[in-house]
Structure formats: C-alpha cells, structure tokens
Image: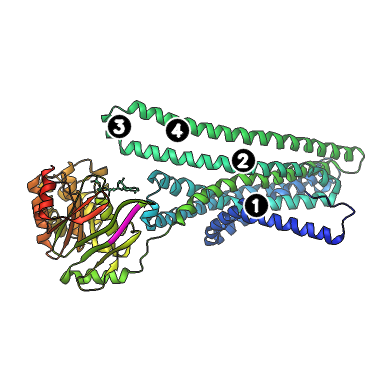
Amino acid sequence: MQNIGPGFSHMERMRVLVGGIKHIIQRIKEGRLQQLMGEILWMYVYVRRYWLMIGIYILLGASGSVLSLGTSVVSKDLVDAITGVNSMEIIRVACTYVGVGVGQIFINAVKSRLSLKVRLKVTNEIRADIYEQVLQTNWESLARYRSGDLLYRVNGDAGMVANTILTFLPNVVTTVISFGGAFIIVVQNDPWMALIALLGAPISFLTSRYSARKMRDFQRENQNVASDRTVFDQETFQNMQFIKAFGMVERVTEKFHKIQDEFVRIALDQNKFQQTMTIATSLVGQAVGYACYGFAAFRLWQGQISYGTMTMFVSMAGSLRGSFSGILGLLPMVIRSGISAERIMEITSLPRDSMEDKEEAEEIRRESRRKGVFVEMEDVDFAYEEEKWVYRDARFQARPGEIVALIGPSGQGKTTTLNLLLGLYHPQRGQVRVGNPGGRMLRASSSTRCLFSYIPQGNTLFTGTIADNMRMVKPEATDEEIRSALEAACAWEFVERLEKGMDTEVRERGNRFSEGQKQRLSIARALLADAPVMILDEATSALDVATERRVLRRIIRREPHRTVIVAAHRPSVFSMCSRIYKVQEGHMAEVTEEEVEEFLQAF
Ligand SMILES: Nc1ncnc2c1ncn2[C@@H]1O[C@H](COP(=O)(O)OP(=O)(O)OP(=O)(O)O)[C@@H](O)[C@H]1O
C-alpha cells in the first residue's frame, strides 16, 4: 500500500488513485467475481423466461415487507392509544392492526402457492434443458464424465439453481424494501438511532466477505462428494448380481459408509465454520440490539419520545439489523448455486454434435435402397490420448452387400474402429468417410449416424416390453414388421413361446433373458432400424455357431445391398466374409487368406 501523504502533489495522488482502480478492475477481471458474474448471468436467462411469474412473486413479497413495516408503525399508534397518549384512535388503530395482520396471512398463502408453481416449472425447465444438451453433446467430450456424475448435475445441481432463481431475487427485493423502509422511518424519527442500529454493519460485511471465500471451497467439495455418492450408488445397484456373486457385500457396504462419513465430515466442517461466523455476527448484533434498546429507553426517560415510539424504535432497529444480515445471508445461497451453475455450465459448454451434413446424409440413405452404402478409412491415425496411438496409417473399406470382419487380439482397436466409423470419435489424421458408391462421400459424423445401425458389446435393452424396445428405433413399426425382424434375428423362436409374446416385459437390463437371447433381440432391433450399414461388435458372441451363421445369412438376405461390418474373435464368421481386416500392434490392414489361416491356427 502506498502512503499518499501531504507531501504528494495532486497529479501523484491521481496517478496512484487511477493505478489502484486499474488494479481492482484487473483483479475483478481475473478473479472470482467475473466467474460468479458469469454464473449469475447464466441463471438470469431462466429468470427472463419466467419474468412474469417471478415478478408477481416479487411484488407479493414486497407487499408483505411493506405490510410488516406497516405493522410496526401501527403498533406504535396502538401502544400510544392504549397508554392514553391517543385514546380516541384506539378502535381505528386496532382495526388497522388486525387488517394488516390478516392481509399478511393471505399474501403469504398466495406467495407460497405461486412459489411452488414457479419452482416446479423452473426446475423442470432447467432439468429438461440440461438433459437435452447432454444428449446432444459430442460423445468424445461426454465420455470423460461418469454417468452418476452427470445424473447428479442434472438433478442435484439443477435443483439448487432453480431454488436460487426463485429465492434470490425476491429475497433481495423484499430485504431491500424492509431495510430501506425501516431506515427511512428511523432516520425521520431519530437519525442517531439509525446510526446506532447500523453500528455492526461494517463487521458483518467484512466477516461475510471472508466467509464467502471459504464457503465456495466447502461447497465445491460438497458437490463433488455428492456426485461421487450418486456414482457409487448407481454402480452398486447396476452391478448387484456381480457384487453378490463375488461375496463383496461387506466390502461395498464398507465403502458406502466411507463415502457417507466423508459427506458427513464435510457437512459438519461447513456447519462448524458457518456457526462460528453466525456466533460472531450474532454477538455483534446482540450488542447493537442492547445499545438500541438502551438508547430508546434513555430517550423515553428524558421524555423525548412516547412508549409507542420506543416500541417502534426497538422493532425497527431489529428489522434494520435483521434485513442487513438477511442480505449478507443470501451470499451462501448465491455461492452454493454459483458452484452448481458452474458444474452445469461445464457440461452445457461442451461441443455439440454437428448436424451440418444431415440433409446430404438423408439423401444418401434414400439412395442406399438402390446403391447401398460404401464405408472407408484412409490413412487414419488415431489416439484417445496424445501420442498413445491405437494405430497409424489405417485403411479400411466395406462395400454394399459385403460382410467385412475386424479381427485381432483384445484391446488392439476393433471397437475403436467401429467408433470412428460411427463418427463418435474423429481421427487425428486421415479420413473416415461414408457415401453411395460413385457418389459424394461424407466425413463420418453425427449427421451420418443415420446410415448405421449398431449393436455394441454388452446389453442395450431398456425397461419395457420387447415391442417397446423394438419401437425405440422405429416408433411406427407394426406388429408384423416387429415379428419379421425378430424372425430374421432368430429371436422369434423364443419370443413366440413366451406367454405374452412380444408384449413380454424385458425387465431392467434384460434380466429376464439369456445372453444369447438378449443379443438376438438387439440384432432384431437393429434390423428394424433398417439402416444401410449394420455394425455388430461381438454381437453374436453368445450364440452357438449354427445360429450365428443363420443370423448373418438372414441379415444379408433381408437386404442384399446392406453393408455389414462385424468385430469378431470367432473363426466361425470368417468364411462368410468378403474381406477381413486385422488390427494389431498399432496397425490395421487387410489380411490374406494365408494370414487368416495363421490367425485360425492360433486359436
Ligand atoms: N475411451 C477411451 N479412452 C482411452 N483409451 C481407450 C478408450 N477406449 C478404448 N481405449 C483403449 O484403446 C485401445 C483399443 O481399445 P478397443 O476397445 O478398440 O479394443 P478392442 O480391440 O475392441 O478390444 P476387445 O476385443 O477386448 O473388445 C485399448 O488399449 C483401450 O484401453
């Protein structure tokens, strides 16, 4: 800090002052304030959408504050009327007093109803917004987040933001009215009283600045643990069978308690800090309260004010202090939702799926009926993490009517290749393209995904009936179409034996069916999507060899122009393939028949 003593010239003082202001602006630009402002602006978008409802809510809140100030003023007249200063007015004053009280009850009821309505609407809207944005986010970015974490952001964080939107602005307005009104009334009656009532303000201000910083750290830690807890719960329930089978119940329970304890620790630490701050500010408040009371009693003793004015002073002083701490008390809420907004914004600012080639892709799909679709990779280098290449200079082609296999040891890049073809990931170098043979080729992206139906590894069945699962890819599909797809996937043979046929409940994660049955249902669903390119990632691995071959033959027979790409470990598929690519040790290349033989020998 520079000393600007009396020896300094006017110019030097100005220079130091301008320097100081610049420094503060710089701090604001770099610091947390800018971040907090960004978060508040983000929330403001939602306030704007519901401005009318929120406006009415604020008006009701404001009228509540005005009525409450009115009560204090009327109570002064009432005490004066009772103590004989103004006994003629007793009935009018008593009626006004009762009227104001009753008015407050009704205003509170309307306020509470409106608040619930806005809260529900805003929460739903924010949740829906985030939900949609998450679904439209580019997979490459989204894959870094755990699904439980996303779940908490959509639910917990969105709820927190909605709550603040509804509470913060109205609270600021009502508190400012309470504060301003009480201040004007007290200043008009006795400026000294106003000064004494605000004695504690600077201390409260300083402590709240300090606590804001600490609270932000606490809150961030809090939200992260809450996310971890959701992730853990979700994974536990999803993998219950595995946990039981491995006798891991005790270990999982232990971990559950650990996370709970961590949550409790943070909450208690946060509360301890908050309570310390509350004790400090309350002690100051108490001292100021006594000072006000003493001062008012002194004025009364000197005969300068009536009993009624003293009552009003004491209640106004309380209101002044209360509303001042009320404004400061909103800070933790802003901080909490600031952190939540920050966590939501982190997700919503991720790059979106681009749909710029959507129309061309649709055109390719229409043309595919006659020509089919050609898929190729040219000189592709790809790494998930910098310099850790899955492969380099990779080439791949699959033409209409072909079954093309991807083989290679585990973890070498088969699924990665399928992800690149689907445009879920993009290569660092080279091209991945799709198009009608002889026509324009499009870069694989979210737009071209409509050309593919994909059966990933693992279970992708959803809660609902078999028919519901089928209609996920084609909502207008008739029962006949569904049956035909089930037949082609060799699934009808077990579905028709079920009591409710295709209306049988699948149950969560397809629990009701065997692995091979789940795979056949997934294949049927992919067939119903009727896309020109079909990708099967180990999607027939649980079928017996005969069924596997039958399914693949039917897939081709159903649509002779279809391009089929399979990632497989089993040699049973190879004899049906037009070409085979091997992915191994950072390379992908087409293999000759001899090399296939060699590969088979290794089995
Ligand atoms: N999202 C990811 N982030 C980072 N690395 C990944 C990711 N997905 C896969 N990998 C890594 O990329 C490599 C290739 O994985 P990929 O899933 O393509 O193998 P795969 O040949 O399909 O194996 P499998 O036959 O076992 O299914 C592996 O070393 C894997 O650890």
Please name the residue shown 42% across and 55% down the image.
128
Give the image location of residue 215, x and y in percent: 60, 41
Q: What crowding class fits label 4: few (fewer than 14 Cα within 10 Å), some (14-19), or many (20 or more)?
A: some
Dot 3 or dot 4, earlier in sequence: 3
Residue indicated by mark 3: 243
Dot 4 or dot 1, earlier in sequence: 1
71 over 275 or under it: above or below: below
Q: Is residue 475 left or right of residue 249?
A: left
> SS at mark 3?
helix
Q: Which of labels 2 and 1 is toward the front?
A: 2
Give the dominant element type of the magenta stretch: helix, strand or loop.
Answer: strand
Give the image location of residue 515, x and y in percent: 18, 42
| Observer able to see residue 215 | yes
Residue indicated by mark 4: 259
Dot 2 or dot 1, earlier in sequence: 1
Q: Which of labels 3 and 1 is toward the front?
A: 3
Give the image location of residue 220, x and y in percent: 53, 43
Q: What crowding class fits label 2: few (fewer than 14 Cα within 10 Å), some (14-19), or many (20 or more)?
A: some
Q: CA distance from mark 4 to mark 1?
A: 36 Å
- The span picked out in magenta is 379-383
- Whether label 3 lies within 8 Å of ligand 1 gets the answer no
Q: Amino acid at mark 4?
A: Ile
- Whether label 4 lies within 8 Å of ligand 1 gets the answer no
Q: Amino acid at mark 3?
A: Ile
Residue indicated by mark 1: 172
